[in-house]
Structure formats: structure tokens, C-alpha cells
Amino acid sequence: MLAIWRREVQAYFYQPIAYVLIAVFFLISSIYFTLGTVASQVAEMNFLFSSITFILTFIIPILTMRIMSEDRKNGTEVLLITSPADVHQIVIGKFLGSFTVFLVMYASTFIFLIILYILGGQPEIPRLIGGYIAFLLIGACYVAIGVFASSVTENQIVAAIISFAILLMVNLVDSIASFIGGFAAKVLDVFSLLSRYSDLNSGILDITSIIYYLSFIAVFLFLTTRVIDKRRWSQG
Amino acid sequence: MIEIQNLTKHFGDIKAVKDVSFTVNKGEILGFLGPNGAGKTTTMNIITGYIPSTTGTVKVDGYDIMDQPREVKRRIGYLPESPPLYLDMTVTDYLDFCASLKDVDKKQWKSQKEDIMELVKISHVQHRLTRNLSKGYRQRVGLAQALVGAPDVLVLDEPTVGLDPKQIIEIRKLIKALGKNHTIILSSHILPEVSAVCERVVIINNGEIAAVDTPENLSKTLDSFTRFTMTVAGPDKRVKELLQQVYGVKVLEVRDKGKENESSYIIESDKNLDVRKPIFNKLAENSYPILELKSLGLSLEDIFLQLTTEETEVN
């Protein structure tokens, strides 16, 4: 697992992809920070978090598109599966690889926090912590979706489009639910990452939300192992 | 060391491997021979645990691949048809990755790595990206990967495909050397390779085993006579008559060469009898010159063709 994680992080940083994505992320989030926080004289980070969560919808699919599909295309999947590592260890290693790049993006937002303090802002501590936890969890969920999408196909572009589509649905599911209403809305709420996000982001440290996110990640990683196992049964 | 019993693999309606059983003894080099699409790669993928079988069992060192995959995978080094390289890594980084993937002890790994690179002769390219290596070197790095962790069993899927003749000879030598302290299954559709390297051959065709034996025995069973083809200038009836007068000669077939006074003959003789000299003398006496004389000795190639084409005719 550690071996795979290390190799994936290396692969991201040996190629320009991680740098480009981190740079894009940082650029757009600084624009949000400058306009939404500094210029509007708001002493909090939470507005920024909900804005940059939306950027992740575009960045995470590109980050994760190669993570599983590349192995299949290059034939290195054989190496991984015939090694003593289990499929779930492989998947978790891969997930952590992409997640590490996300963590770098995540860490870059601390710069905004420092600037905020320098400018004399006094953000509420509980909301700040809630916001950071929520952003971390939702990022992990997005990465898990991306890893899953990447396991479905050996084509990176298709993988990116699939995870982009799922993430768009995640963004829209609240509006759809409130439009339909009734029982269907309750069902759709299961997929609603963002409604729980706004709770956490407003400083309500609800343990059920945190468990919800962790289970969401677990389910998608589990689905990824199923996809790989299924393919081993049906393909040569 | 490796026991394979009643292995069957279906892909939907296609039966890629049908009821294959064989064993590989410790320290043996087993050749796995068959035309393309015969089920060689599928069988190897099952043995190494890449894909599960539909029915049947594979046991390595007593461990079943389905029940204790980790134990089996620890004991096998696999070189698939195209070496599974990460093209964005250098050779050393790649081998380090393989070692940690296979849980090789870190202290042991340092010296083992030097040994492996020495053995497959890749020390001088160790800091290059695998992307920039030639096919031959990529194959060697793939082989080095299979050797990581010092597994007892090596499974090599067409290890010489796409290499130039010099590289082929080197890789064969290397495999022979490895055979001294490894159990090896080697697949190939190139026959001389198998007869040069392997101690025992499994011939597989259409997913079924057609024969299992040593290369020598396979030749012996089917090669109890010697065949020649010869071209002689002279009227075919007369020449045939003369040929049949030679002791131990049987004329199987006369072929018209399309030229006047020139025909070719397929001749069979007893194995222990060299009939070439008496034939020459006989025909020289009658001044019918031999224009061509070629042995049609049954090589492994012929055996292979016989065994595998009979099958297709039945189908």
C-alpha cells in the first residue's frame, strides 16, 4: 500500500500535472479570496471554502483520471495484481496518492488564513475548524469518486468525463431534490454531499456528517475494488 | 512445485482453456508451447493469480491460488508478454518500487538489487528512464522485476518476442542459468527455443493439452523414419523403379516439376539406414543426375504442426 502511494505521489510530481493543477487551484482560490474575502471585508474563510469546493469539481477529475486507467492501459495492472498486495490495498494506495496532491492544495489555503490574520481579521475559531474539516472531507469524497471513475475505463478522458458528470450531479442533487420533493427527495439526499457540507462549514461539528463522509469514501473505494475484481473474472 | 488440475476458463461463451492439468517439478524448466491464441497467456495469468479460473485448481508449493493468493504470489515472479514497466520511472526506482510492492526486506534488497542487475546486465542503464530503453532492455528490466524478492518460481510469457537474434540468444542463456535454482514455466510459439531451453514440453492447442513430454521423446515417438525430398533429372517411371531397387527405400510420392525429364520424389527410409550413398551410386550408374537432396527430418516443428493441425482438421 505504501509502495503504491509513494509511486503515485512520485508520478504526479515527476510530471507537470500536479504542479499545473495546484497552480490553477491556487490561482482561482486567490481570486475568490481577494474578491470575496479581502475586498468584501469579511473576516472568515468559510465563504471561500464553499466557493473553492466548486473548483474541485473541475480539478479533481483531471487529477484522478489516470490513477487507475493508466495501469490498465500500460499493462502494469498485472504487476500490481500479481504482487502479494490485495486489490483493496492497491485501491487505497492509489486513493492516497491522489489525495496527497489534494492535501497540497488544501495546505495552500493556509496562506489565505495567515493573510487574513495579518490584515487583522478575527475569524471565529469553531467555524474555522469546521470549515477546514468539511473541506478536507469533501475533497476526499471527490477524490474517491474520481478513483472509481478511473477504474471503469482505460481511457483517461472518458474517466475524467465520468467523474466530472458524477461531481456535477453531486452539485445539483440538492436543487433536484427540492424541486421534486417528497420521498424521492429523501432518497436523493443520501447523495447530497453538499447539504452536510454547509452544516459543517457553519461550524456545526455533527458526528453523523463526518461518519457520512467517511462511509461515502469507503463505498466508492469498495466499488472500485469490485470493478477491478469483476473485470478479472470476465476478461483475459 | 506447481500442480495444475482440471483448469478451465470461460470468457462468456468462449472456452479459452479446457480441462488443463499438468505438474511442474522443482527446479524444472517447462516449455509451454502453442500457436497464438491457444490459451498460453490465459493459463499463465491464472497460475500467477492475475485472473481467476472458472473451475480447477492451481497449487504452488502446496498453496492454492484461490485460498491463499498471497502465499502463492510471494513465490512467483511473473514476466507478462509485455513487460509491466512504469515508463516514467528510472530502472532503479522501478525495481525499488517492485521490491517494496513485494515486501522485500529492505536490508536484503540492497545486495539483491545489485545481483539482479548484474545478472540481467542492466547495471549500466540503471539511471535511465525505462521509457528511453530499447525493447531488449525493457524485456530485461521486466525479467529483473520478476526476479525481485527471489521467488522460487518464474513464469515467463514469451520472453524473447520482439528481440533481435543476439538478444534472443542472451535471454535464452540467462533463462537456462536461472533454471539452475528456479522452477520455470516458459511459454513460446517458437519451437527451437523450447527445445533449446526446456527439459519438458507441454503442447497446448485450442485450450487443450495436445502432448506432454521431453523434446527428445516427442521427436522419438514420431520420428521413427527419415524422409528426404530429392529432385532427379530423368524419366520419372524409370527413376522410381531404380530408387525402389535400393535396399530400405520407399518412394512415397512423385511430383512433376513441370519441366521435361525432371521430377521430385519424397523418399522414406528406415531410421538407422543411410540410403543417400546407395541412391547416388544407383542413379549415377544410370546417369540420372541428382539435382537436389534435402532431409525432411521430423523436427519439433513438425511434431508441433502435426499435433496442432490434426486438431483443427477435426474441428
Image (spheres, rainbow, N blue to C red):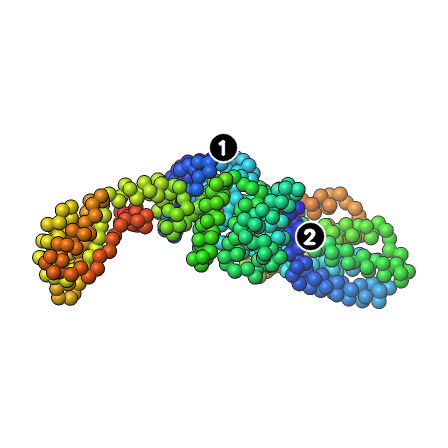
* Rendering coords of residue B277 (x, y %): 18, 52
Q: Total number of numbered labels?
A: 2
Which residue is most to the top? B62
Q: Is residue A211 visible?
A: yes
Residue shown at the point (66%, 46%) measured from the top left:
A2
| Left or right side of B231 for A172 | right
Please state which of residues A94 and A193 is positioned toward the viewer in this rendering: A94
| Left or right side of B311 for A71 | right
Are there few (<14), some (14-19), or many (20+) residues within 10 Å of tag 2?
Answer: many
* Rendering coords of residue B69 (x, y %): 54, 38
Find disc 1 in the rendering and name its residue: B62
Q: What amino acid does circle 2 point to?
A: Phe
Foreground tag (2 vs 1): 1
Image mark 2: chain: A
Q: Are marks 2 and 1 on the same chain?
A: no
- Tell me the element at label 2: helix
Residue shown at the point (52%, 60%) measured from the top left:
B134
Please state which of residues B192 and B68 is positioned toward the viewer in this rendering: B192
Image mark 1: chain: B
Which residue is most to the right? A120
Find disc 2 in the rendering and name its residue: A99
Please state which of residues B96 and B235 is positioned toward the viewer in this rendering: B235
Residue shown at the point (50%, 40%) measured from the top left:
B181
Q: Is residue B145 visible?
A: no
Q: What amino acid does circle 1 point to?
A: Gly
Residue shown at the point (22%, 44%) measured from the top left:
B271
Distance, label 2 to label 1, CA atoms, is 40 Å
> Where is residue B162, by image quadrant?
bottom left
* Rendering coords of residue A198 (x, y %): 75, 53
| Left or right side of B143 for B233 | left
